[in-house]
Image (spheres, grey):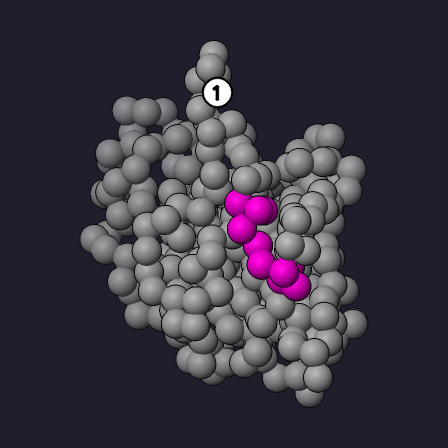
Amino acid sequence: MATCPPRNIGEAQVSLFPHERCDLPSGRRSGAPWLARASLMYFDLTTLDRTRFGGLLVVPDVHAHPDALDAAATRAREEGLFLVQLGDLVDRGPSSAMAVALMRELEDVGEGTFLCGNHEHKLARFANGGGSAAPGRVETLRELTDFGDGLLEWYLARIAEGRLFARAPKLVLAHAAFHRAMLDEAPRPNRALHDRALYGVGKKVEGKKFPVRSREWVREIPAGVTVVVGHDVVDPREPHRESNAHGGRAICLDTGGWRADGTWSTWRFRWDEVLPDA
Ligand SMILES: [Mn+2]
């Protein structure tokens, strides 16, 4: 992958990102009217039209593989399911721009949506003049800018809405990990929830430079609730499933299709699995 030499980073920021802040107008194009009913911090899955969709298709980290997202979107359409992508649309793969453009199409026709991942968060910070200029991030921004058609602005505006999780009474979807406050009646923005949703839980381990990812958040899932996350490839062969002592359940859906040893996974939920028992 081509990278931008470090000496050009400051210059690239100026020329690529004339806007100073992330609070661009959202709802460009057709405006996806179903979004208006969703809270900005989370997506209430019960607002989806259950006469149009028989359930959900959950798609983990795409990492710039538009073919994988396209295949999932085709399956969702064929099976009458609404697609929810768990974040990390960009970076690492062959085309961040095509992956984002495809997601914009899905949102425009109301067939799917995405949550914020850590790669969205870092990209937006960098685009706004903060964060670190990792070579891949510079390249992704350049790619989204070169695509034109307002794609970068659309993506940044959607990220700025800060949608950290999606939920139905018996289901929580987030990029990296669950936080109890995601089930509050009226969730309020808070730092702990934000960090969990985007980055998960890291534990310092003696002798390791970076914190090791921990799944101790699984213990906090209440009985009867399923949490689906991406972010961390626990098992590259199949989704990792784990239950806690109360009967709360976690599914780690990222099986690393974007890396050489991985596979692509998706997960279907019918409404009767995620809504309260009738
Ligand atoms: Mn991630």
**What residue occupies the far top of the structure in this picture?**
207
| Residue 72 x/y as whole percent | 71, 59
Kindly identify the residue that appears in the image at 65 percent across and 76 percent down.
275
Q: Is residue 28 above or below residue 233?
A: below
Q: Residue at x 26, y 48 (%)?
A: 128
The answer to which image quadrant residue 39 occupies is bottom left
Residue 136 screen position, x and y as percent: 45, 34
Q: Is residue 273 visible?
A: yes
Residue under pointer 1 = 205
Q: Amino acid at mark 1?
A: Val
Give the magenta part as a residue range.
217-226
* Residue lying farthest to the bottom in this orientation: 51
Quarter of the picture containing the C terminus is bottom right
Q: Position of residue 204 (x, y in %)?
A: 44, 24
Between residue 28 and residue 204, name the one nearer to us.
Answer: 204
Mark 1 close to ligand 1, CB under 8 Å: no
Q: Secondary structure at mark 1?
A: loop
Q: Can residue 145 be seen in the rendering of this structure?
A: no
Residue 223 is a magenta residue: yes
Which residue: 69% across, 46% down? 242
Drawn side of residue 65 relative to residue 138, left or right: right
Q: Residue furthest left?
A: 20
Query: Looking at the picture, does residue 213 appear above or below residue 86?
Result: above
Left or right side of 109 for 10: left
Whether residue 53 sits left or right of residue 114 in the image: it is right
Mark 1 crowdedness (10 Å alpha carbons): few <14, some 14-19, many ≥20: few
